[in-house]
Amino acid sequence: MPEPIARSIERHFGGMRDPRIDRCKRHQLLDILVIAICAVICGADDWTEVAAFGEAKLAWFRTFLDLPHGIPSHDTFGRVFARLDPTQFETCFVRWIKSVSDVLPGAVIAVDGKEARRSHDQRHGKAAITMVSAWAADNHLVLGQIAADAKSNEITAIPELLQVLALKGCIVTIDAAGCQTEIAQQIIAQGSDYVLALKDNQPSLAADVALVFQDCHASPPDSYAVDHAQTIEKGHGRIEIRDCWTIADPAVLAPLRRSEAWAGLQSIIEVRAERQSPTERTVATRYYISSLPGKAEQALRATRTHWQVENSVHWVLDVAFREDDSRLRRDYGPENVAILRRMALDLLKQDTSLKIGIKGKRKAAGWDEAYLLHLLAPLLH
């Protein structure tokens, strides 16, 4: 009998304020939340499907939920999640993640944003939401997420997200949108290191770093104190070669424009990625600043790990959860459903019993209540 599920949900999410007035509370908030979580895990992609899943599993849900008025309608699910405070929901999500995960020192935490393309509401002047997520690659977990303000994009959302996370001893990687002095200062203040991508958002610094490495490659070998690492991978008919160079000499870093503004700056990084296939060869060069001490192997691992968020989170949300097809637009609905999807993704990622993809696991959970209970096990902590 799965009674512990309800008790655990109460422990982690019981502090959320119910947005409904008392006379409209035919269904308990936690019952609505439990049904929605289970339905999203099992393949439901909209409120009609969530309600249909609940009806199909009514007998099972009644083994651990009261459900005095049966399964809520799809309109009820929609109204509740449209009005539920996403900040409270996110706080509960992070609290749950902290209780079930152990992020070790040195772990790479990739912070990146993803736009839910069809969440815009042109008639009401509402832009599509961008959810900024923190992904712990070693743990295969989304540690937290927050919706970016439409006017400021990710720049203000990243500090808010970092603030609620336990990052001590970790390496935080962020793409060029988050390469800001204030963000670097915050990461250092929280006891972490950073690797920040350089692009047009910091044009002077990016140009200076590029010139340093150009001179480094053109100079005699002993002209710069430089560290180098390389990886070579073969597969799918192509070869990928990644070279990484780091420079941590204070005499080289000091002349960089506004170098003093970057808290904890210890090294600059160049990564050159070459991809060869039978029909073409491409080369891409990227530059970074970092508070790491300048070990090329560590820097290369951090920069490579950052891009896992694209395949392990963003791509999966699009393909397995059809996030870009979702037309939820009402009030806080898009943000809260995005949290539900990432919660479901975390639970599915933690399972290693089935050697199939996320989409297959969602189907298996819908077919097999024992497997669904197995997936929910982390919620019982």
Image (cartoon, helix red, strand yellow):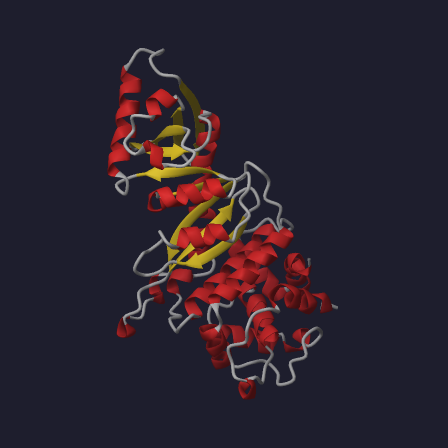
Q: What is the x, y in percent for residue 153? A: 33, 55
Q: In this orientation, does residue 308 appear?
A: no
Q: Disc count in the image?
A: 0
Q: Depth check: 342 or 261 in front? A: 261
Q: Quadrant of residue 208?
A: top left
Can you name the residue that lies furthest to the front here?
Answer: 260
Q: In terms of image quadrants, where is residue 126?
A: bottom left
Q: Is residue 137 visible?
A: yes
Q: Position of residue 368 (x, y in %)?
A: 65, 64
Q: Position of residue 166 (x, y in %)?
A: 55, 48
Up-down: is 292 above or below 359?
Answer: above
> Residue sitting at 39 percent across and 31 percent down?
240
Q: Which of 94 and 343 is in front in this view?
A: 94
Q: In which quarter of the image is the N terminus?
A: bottom right
Residue closest to the eye, 283 or 15: 15
> Is residue 278 left or right of 104 when viewed as pictured?
left
Q: As drawn, which residue projects farthest toward the right? A: 1
Quadrant the C terminus occupies: bottom right
Q: Is residue 330 left or right of 366 when viewed as pictured?
A: left
Residue 24 is situated, as x and y percent measured from the top left of the image, at: 53, 86
Please determine whether, in this image, residue 273 is positioned above or below residue 112: above
Q: Nearer the viewer, residue 353 or 215?
A: 215
Q: In this view, does 155 lie to the left or right of 194?
A: left
Residue occupying the point 41% across, 41% down: 184
Q: Which residue is drawn at 38% across and 69% down?
A: 327
Q: Quadrant of residue 307?
A: top left
